[in-house]
Amino acid sequence: QVQLVESGGGSVQPGGTLRLSCAPSRIIFSIYAMGWYRQAPGKQRDLVATITNDGTTHYADSVKGRFTISRDNANDTIYLQMNNLKPEDTAVYYCHVDRRYSGLVDYWGQGTQVTVSS
């Protein structure tokens, strides 16, 4: 069973920075894209950022210009650099592996808490 191991969450003040990372416990085949989603209490899980195999990135409007997603293709590790954090960024952040074109199941991480508060 593959696990996505997330790290880097924590508590910061508004304007602060955090860097999340996500690494699979073993090789995953047929990846189309990897990305980050987040879920605040009482809300649905929303896309934050994704990166495809060819490096194409996509961001939610709310994080454009503040967050950067990157990927180490050698080991399928992804990162989310979060700058100028705002209280509304507070949520549990989940790593996701998208295998939409393979017919195989996607993978989700266990989630890491990000709290932005003064």
Image (tube, rainbow, N blue to C red):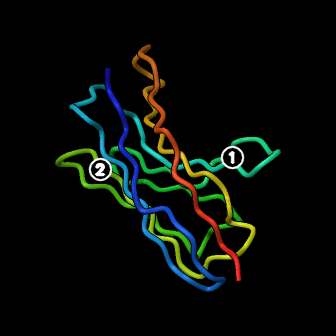
Residue 14 lies in quadrant: bottom right
On the image, the x and y values in percent for residue 58 come to 54, 55
Look at the picture and state if 3 lies above or below 68.
Answer: above
- C-alpha distance separating marks 1 and 2: 21 Å
Percent of width and height locating residue 59: 59, 59
Q: Position of residue 2 (x, y in %)?
A: 32, 26
Q: Write the residue at 27% across / 45% down.
A: 76
The residue indicated by pointer 1 is: 46
Residue 116 placement, left or right of 33: right
Disc 1 residue crowd, few under 14, some 14–19, many 20+, Cα 10 Å: some
Residue at horizontal 66 percent and vertical 56 percent from the top: 91
Residue at the limit of the structure toward the right, as seen here: 42
For this view, does 65 lie left or right of residue 24? right
* Disc 2 target residue: 77
Label 1 sits on a secondary structure element that is strand
> What residue is at 80 percent from the left and 45 percent from the top?
43
Is tag 1's residue or tag 2's residue first in the polypeptide sequence? 1
Front position in the image: 69 or 42: 42
Decide: few, some or many residues near mark 2? Use Cα within 10 Å; few <14, some 14-19, many ≥20: some
Vertical position of residue 31 compared to residue 41: above or below: above
What amino acid is at disc 1? Asp
Give the quadrant of the N terminus.
top left
| Residue 78 image position (x, y, % from top left) | 35, 53
Q: Is residue 98 above or below residue 48?
A: above
Residue positioned 43% across, 27% down in the render: 99
Residue 29 lies in quadrant: top left
Residue 42: name its quadrant.
Answer: top right
Q: Quadrant of the C terminus?
A: bottom right
